[in-house]
Image (tube, grey):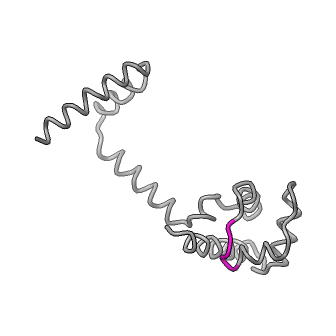
Amino acid sequence: MDANKQKKQFSDQLKAAMITKGYEAKAAVLEREFNLRYYGKAITIQGAAKWLRGQSIPRADKILTLSKWLEVEPSELVYGVEIKEKIKESKKKWQEAIGYQEKEVFEAFLNLPVPQRKIVREVILAFSLACKE
C-alpha cells in the first residue's frame, strides 16, 4: 500500500472510531482528548488536523494512545478492519490444510535445537526441489 493511501485509510479509521465513541471528528476535539491521555509531548491542533485530513500518520506510541482511548486495535486504526479478516482467513486456511500428523511433526520440529532445525529444513527443501523437477 502506498503512503498516501495508508494515510487516507488511517484518517478514515480515526474519524470512524471517534464518531463511534461519541466524539466529533474535529481537530480541536482530537487534540484535547489525545493530550489528556498522552504523557509525551502534546500534539498541536495542526498536528491533529493533519491526522484527520490524511496528511500524516502518528508514531507507534501515539497510535497506541489513540487505540486505548478509542478502544480499537492499533492495527485497525492503521490498516483497517480488513487486515484482521485477512489474517483470520489465512490462519483458518492453514489450520484446515494440515492434519494431526503434520501438526505433530511441526511441534517436534519446533522443539529441536536450532542446528538440527537447519538440517531438517535443508532436507525438506531438497526433497521439494527434487519433486518439482
Along the line of sight, the residue nearer the viewer: 21 or 75:
75
Quarter of the view holding residue 108: top left
Image position of 70 with respect to 110: above or below: below
Name the side, left or right, on which 24 lies relative to 120.
Answer: right
Residue at 76% in and 76% down: 22
Q: Which segment did they paint magenta?
A: 53-57
Quarter of the view holding residue 55: bottom right
Furthest residue in direction left, as rendered:
133
Along the line of sight, the residue nearer the viewer: 55 or 111:
55
Q: Give the quarter of the figure containing the C terminus.
A: top left
Rendered location of residue 63, percent (x, y): 71, 60
Residue at 87% in and 54% down: 39
Image position of 45 with respect to 95: above or below: below
Image position of 40 with respect to 132: above or below: below
Magenta span: helix, strand or loop, mainly?
loop
Rendered location of residue 105, percent (x, y): 32, 27
Residue at 35% in and 46% down: 94
